[in-house]
């Protein structure tokens, strides 16, 4: 005599299939980003990190140095030195790749180190965007100020949603505009002399990323 299968028993395989499909969609969407990250680490971060390990430079020192560079970039931007500020900002972003590589290659990776790096990243990004807001305030450019604070709000919310999602054991690194993309967009905009366009892209696409991550968490957590 066969065992009867109730609605819950039939629903379990369907839920597993849905979760598998969602995981596959997520991996496909992340594939270009993962390839770019792998190339950057292989050809830049890892070779430089090995040299820094020989020099006994700690990951936390690199994290602090990256934050310091971001503060310098923010000051330059507030003073209207957009090109130099953009170059310094991109240099700080390059340094940000190194602390994680040094930690992993030297066997010093830790939970607190990852937390500390994330906090400093958020503060550095906020400082840069605030520096641009100050620049536009001095120039009495109301639209620029709105764009700077819009970009700041969107950036912080994108990062917050990722942290909150991962606190619920849901992968939160989905969406159009993560931190690496924001750095590239703003860096290019500063180098070509049109920071307002970069801020506008970050504000608008960042808001879409917030909605995308919220929808992703909803789909992943609903029963």
Image (spheres, helix red, strand yellow):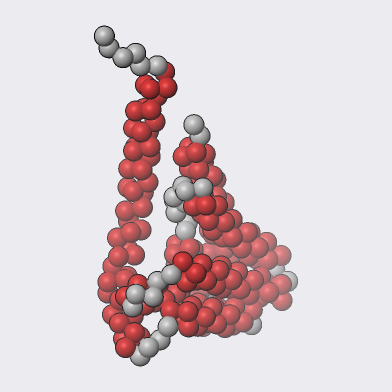
Estimate the x, y position of residue 62 in percent, counting from the top left: 46, 81
Residue 110's spot in the image, x, y percent?
Answer: 43, 70
Q: How many marks?
A: 0
- Residue sitting at the far front: 1
Q: Which is nearer the eye, 14 or 48?
A: 14
Q: Residue 99 appears at what percent x and percent y?
A: 42, 76
Q: In the picture shown, does residue 157 fall above or below 223?
A: below
Give the residue at x 47% y 79%.
60
- Identify which residue is drawn at 34% across, 84% down: 53
For the view shown, which residue lies furthest in the bottom direction?
A: 55
Q: Is residue 83 left or right of residue 52?
A: right
Q: Can residue 121 be spotted in the picture?
A: no
Q: Is residue 65 above or below residue 161?
A: below
The one nearer the camera, 74 or 217, is: 217
Q: Is residue 54 left or right of residue 152?
A: left
In the displayed orientation, state which residue is furthest to the top: 1
Q: Nearer the viewer, residue 133 or 59?
A: 59
The quadrant in which the N terminus is found is top left
């Amino acid at each position: 005599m066969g065992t009867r299968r109730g609605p819950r028993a039939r629903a379990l395989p369907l839920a597993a299939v849905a979760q598998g499909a969602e995981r596959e969609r997520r991996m496909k969407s992340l594939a270009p980003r993962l390839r770019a990250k792998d190339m950057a680490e292989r050809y830049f971060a890892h070779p430089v990190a090995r040299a820094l390990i020989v020099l006994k430079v700690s990951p936390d020192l690199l994290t602090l140095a990256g934050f310091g560079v971001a503060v310098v970039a923010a000051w330059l931007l507030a003073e209207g030195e957009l090109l130099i500020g953009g170059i310094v900002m991109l240099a700080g972003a390059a340094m940000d790749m190194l602390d994680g590589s040094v930690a992993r290659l030297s066997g010093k990776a830790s939970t607190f180190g990852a937390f500390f790096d994330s906090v400093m990243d958020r503060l550095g990004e906020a400082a840069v965007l605030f520096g641009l807001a100050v620049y536009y305030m001095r120039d009495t450019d109301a639209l620029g100020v709105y764009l700077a604070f819009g970009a700041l709000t969107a950036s912080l919310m994108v990062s917050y949603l990722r942290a909150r999602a991962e606190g619920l054991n849901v992968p939160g690194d989905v969406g159009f505009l993560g931190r690496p993309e924001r750095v590239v967009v703003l860096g290019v905009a500063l180098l070509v002399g049109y920071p307002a366009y970069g801020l506008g892209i970050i504000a608008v696409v960042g808001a879409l990323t917030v909605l995308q991550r919220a929808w992703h968490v909803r789909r992943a957590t609903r029963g």
